């Protein structure tokens, strides 16, 4: 490392090379926590995870089997080695379960009483955490790949939904309708990347 720093200081090394090398070293040094495990509920792969931002205690997972699981991450046993238990799940026999793979789950940013999920079944579902019932369902004409809510927005309840088509749709949780369609976003995004290089 001292050799890198000396060469960088002398102007012999690309400034980004040290950053890339150090980032790679740190990533390769990461390990999973051996003291904590997660109860296995999904019958197949897990596509998405989200930890609630209010307390950091609960985690949602969405699987390729269409199942959504809610986990409690708190170590209530106070033992060194423990397994995070599933509190509840929206399984295959639930009446509102997604028909196909769940691609995104996300907690409502300001309250753990609600979360959203989107799926290849062309839906975005808004869930009541306490009853595990859908509060609202948004249907789309194309496969839904992803959705996201702003964690800092306080004046609106919009969810951006990305589908197979080239447009991003904004769903308003207050009115229950798709309020806007963003059309030039991909061109803008590509232009921004090109200009920032």
Image: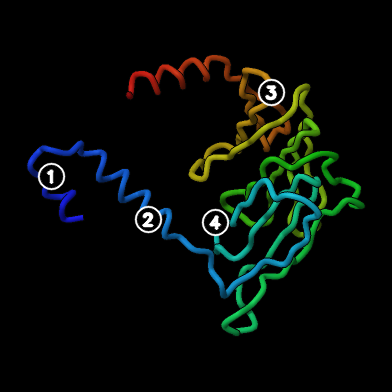
- The quadrant the C terminus occupies is top left
Circle 1 is placed at which residue position?
A: 7
Q: Residues within 10 Å of mark 3 (few under 14, many from 20)?
A: some
Residue ID at (40%, 23%)? 193
In percent of width and height, residue 68 lies at: 76, 52
Element type at mark 3: loop
Q: Horizontal and vertical percent for residue 58?
A: 63, 62
Q: Quadrant of the N terminus?
A: bottom left
In what element is the residue under mark 2?
Answer: helix
Mark 1 residue crowding within 10 angstroms, few (<14) / some (14–19) / many (20+): some
Which residue corresponds to the image point at 92% horizontal and 52% vertical from the top-left? 93
Circle nearer the N terminus (2, 3): 2
Nearer mark to the viewer, of 4 and 3: 3
Mark 3 against mark 1, which lies toward the viewer?
1
Tell me which label, 3 or 1, sits earlier in the chain: 1
Whichever of labels 4 and 3 marks the residue nearer the N terminus, that label is 4
The first of marks 4 and 1 along the sequence is 1
Badge 4: how crowded within 10 Å, few (<14), some, or many (20+)? some
Residue sitting at 26 percent across and 40 percent down?
Answer: 17
Q: Which residue is mark 4?
A: 53
Q: Residue visible at 66% across and 31% down? A: 171
Going from the N terminus, do you reach mark 2 or mark 1 first?
1
> Mark 4 and mark 3: span between their CA atoms?
29 Å
Q: Which residue is mark 3?
A: 164
Q: Which mark is residue 26?
A: 2
Q: Are marks 4 and 3 in contact (CB under 8 Å)?
A: no
Foreground tag (2 vs 1):
1
């Amino acid at each position: 490392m001292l050799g890198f720093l000396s060469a960088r200081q002398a102007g012999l090394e690309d400034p980004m090379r040290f950053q890339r090398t150090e980032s790679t070293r740190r990533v390769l040094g990461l390990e999973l926590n051996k003291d904590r495990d997660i109860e296995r509920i999904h019958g197949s792969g897990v596509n998405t995870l989200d930890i609630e931002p209010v307390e950091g205690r609960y985690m949602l997972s969405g699987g390729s089997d269409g199942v959504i699981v809610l986990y409690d991450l708190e170590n209530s046993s106070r033992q060194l080695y423990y397994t995070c238990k599933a509190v509840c799940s929206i399984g295959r026999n639930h009446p509102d379960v997604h028909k196909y793979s769940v691609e995104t789950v996300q907690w409502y940013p300001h309250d753990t009483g609600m979360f959203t999920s989107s799926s290849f079944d062309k839906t975005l579902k808004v869930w009541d955490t306490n009853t595990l019932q859908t509060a609202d369902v948004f249907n789309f004409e194309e496969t839904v790949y992803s959705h996201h809510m702003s964690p800092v927005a306080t004046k609106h309840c919009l969810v951006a939904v990305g589908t197979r088509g080239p447009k991003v749709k904004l769903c308003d949780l207050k009115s229950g309708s798709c309020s806007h369609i963003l059309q030039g976003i991909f061109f803008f995004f590509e232009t921004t990347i090109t200009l920032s290089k």
